[in-house]
Image (cartoon, helix red, strand yellow):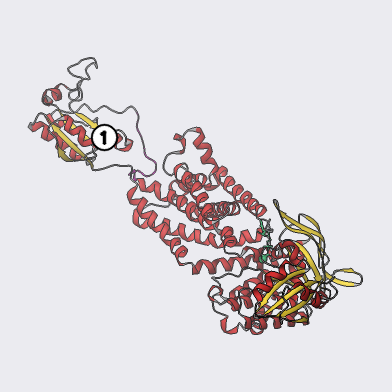
Amino acid sequence: MSSSSVDGKDLVIKARGMGKNFGALKAIQHLDLDIERGKIYGFLGPNGCGKTTSIRMLTGLLTPTYGEVDVLGLKLPQQANQLRYHIGYMTQIFSMYRDLTVRENLSFIAKVYGIHGTTQKQRIEELLDIYNLSRLADQFAGSMSGGQRQRLALAAAVLHKPDLLFLDEPTSAVDPESRRDFWEQLFDLSESGTSILVSTHYMDEAERCHGLAILEAGIKRADGTPEALMAGMNANVIEVQSDRIRQLKEQLLQTPSVISAAQLGTRLRVLIEKDVSQPKEHLLSCLSNQEAESLTMVRPSLEDVFVTCTGEGRQ
Amino acid sequence: MNFVYRIQAIFYKELMQLKRDRMTFGMVVMIPLIQLLLFGFAINTNVRHIPVGLVDQSQTALSRILVQTVSATQVVTFTHQYASVEEAQNAISKQDVRAVFIIPADVSQRLVRHGSVGFATPPATDQETSRPIAQWLTDGSDTMIAASIKGLRNMPLAELISKSANRNTPTFEVTLLYNPEQRTVVNIVPGLVAVILTMTMIMFTSAAIVREREQGNLELLINTPLKSIELMLGKIIPYIFIGLIQVTLILSLGYFIFHVPINGSMLALAGITLLFISSSLVLGLVISTIAKNQLQSMQMTVFVLLPSILLSGFMFPYEGMPRVAQIIAEALPATHFMRLIRGVALRDVEVLTMTFDLYWLAGFTLFGLLLAALRFKKRLD
Ligand SMILES: Nc1ncnc2c1ncn2[C@@H]1O[C@H](COP(=O)(O)OP(=O)(O)O)[C@@H](O)[C@H]1O
Ligand SMILES: [Mg+2]
């Protein structure tokens, strides 16, 4: 499959100024994306920030109001039909037939992609095995648990061995253990050369991605590798240990240079602007009666990045 | 040949889903069965045993014989006696009886002077002789009942006074070419094929696309290489078989229970039925691409179904309807099929001579299929 390249990088998705309006609602505004081949790329953002809308435009299901989209070297939405054979899409809402069994669902998808006969049989057996569905093969999709449904949906999405896989909040209805297994499977797919775009609102999942875009209210606030995002964060993180955290929090939030203060048990995690040269001292000076509070500089997490760069939208 | 696999994929999926949907599956058999029995036994334009009352002001042997003669027709059954005309009128308004037979006190004089008795027809101006023998009061709001009572106006009564009757020779003679016994059911059974197929076929497919949308399967479908026209074809083919099962059921029940003959060729019958099933399924598909949810698709189905029953010629002769109704009727596949199936099944018409209706159904099917495929966008916006 062909693809575009920018600065020598092999791109599977290239979007320039992509936007979508639903009437007066600006669901996505001027989104630029460069997603490299073979990577797991994440869309991180709260509900309603436009993750599903973006994915639908990148799969050719929605026509962008403006902007240019190029997926696997194909222009969207004009060449959407050609793209179908090369992408897989796991929808946010379970979209397999609930009144068909696991095997019937997979067989249906296989036929639609023109896979039949023994090739089909082998491929389905292989998928049942990989995704641990063999025992459930004759169960109705509607009667399965969240984790089982998710595995079926993934099996269906990769059945025709797509080059590029779109996963829209794949783990939202799934317990933590299944989430871990699921990510193992994504890494296996990535290993075997499949490029993956996954949307999520979980920080820990976002942190596993090779690349990441943080979306808020239809606008991309930041992108890059999780490490780069954390390193380049526009704030320092200080944890304050105290036994009167609630008053402390009130006080700190009044201070202009403090971006946020969040309670974590008996500690307060404070984000303070990077321009402040000596953050610890600055913080101490802000506290009116300087009792025995202990302050520590800590390593930023992805959540800190998220809070820092999405702050504007909330004020 | 990939398109064959894709159509086949949809076809199997629909069959599976239909098989598991017990309710719908049951309806495939129950709708034709129950409708046929209901309509076959209930729709009867030869009205009999209408409950009527009697006001006998003469109380003579003659009046009693008169009542017996009227009863013998079986059109009416005397259920009540009333002393006065007012009382009888009240009974009609309360629907105790549908009509009242009033025999005047001077019934014997009226009878002997009446024009229907004897050989000569006296001039109509003659007050004495043009007086009727007795009178019917009936509820005119139900035209079917009123017509049956009117049919009793010209009863030959000469036998009552042992004189030979003045039976007027009719001006015209009527020869009944088909259905000589004049049984309503003969006309109804083939018509029912049209009505039941309209109902079930449109209903099945009108929900087809909407259901995929409502249950969240549409996003999966449109993201596959499946083409609109393949989806449409895959959706209608299983129901063609269902339609054929239903037709077979209706016609064989009609034959065995109601003795409705099939005079024409089976091949022609199968051909026109296939054509009509396809056009109804396609109409359902078009509805399905317009409706936003299953309730809307149901409403639109009823919107098509009612005129198909009332205007297609099933209930009333097409020729007797006003121009506007005829134009609407021409737009409905059921009207064309009604002509075709009655022609083939009852009159053994050579089907290829009914080109207008055949072309119309074929054209409707093709046009509808294209329209549905074009309306169904492989997009969410
Ligand atoms: N078809 C639509 N018509 C109108 N508004 C829509 C439509 N789809 C999404 N939206 C709106 O666009 C915004 C982004 O939605 P979505 O992409 O579903 O967010 P996410 O997937 O991140 O939760 C939301 O405000 C949502 O209400
Ligand atoms: Mg979403």
Please indicate whether residue B145 sits to the left or right of residue A226 in the image.
left
Q: What residue sits right under mark 1 in the picture?
A: B149
| Residue in the picture at 23% in, 28% down | B167
Question: Horizontal and vertical percent for residue A277?
Answer: 86, 74
Image quadrant assignment for residue A158: bottom right
Give ligand 2's quarter of the image. bottom right
Magenta region includes residue B71: no
Residue B226 or residue B4, whichever sits in front: B226
Magenta region, residue range:
B172-183
Image quadrant assignment for residue A242: bottom right
Q: Mark 1 belongs to which amino acid?
A: Ile
Tell me the quadrant of the picture where the C terminus of chain A can be found.
bottom right
Question: Horizontal and vertical percent for residue A142?
Answer: 54, 72
Residue A291 or residue B70, whichever sits in front: A291
Image quadrant assignment for residue A19: bottom right
Chain letter of disc 1? Answer: B
Tell me the quadrant of the picture where the N terminus of chain A can be found.
bottom right
| Residue in the picture at 89% in, 68% down | A6
Badge 1 element: helix
For the stretch drawn in magenta, the main secondary structure is loop
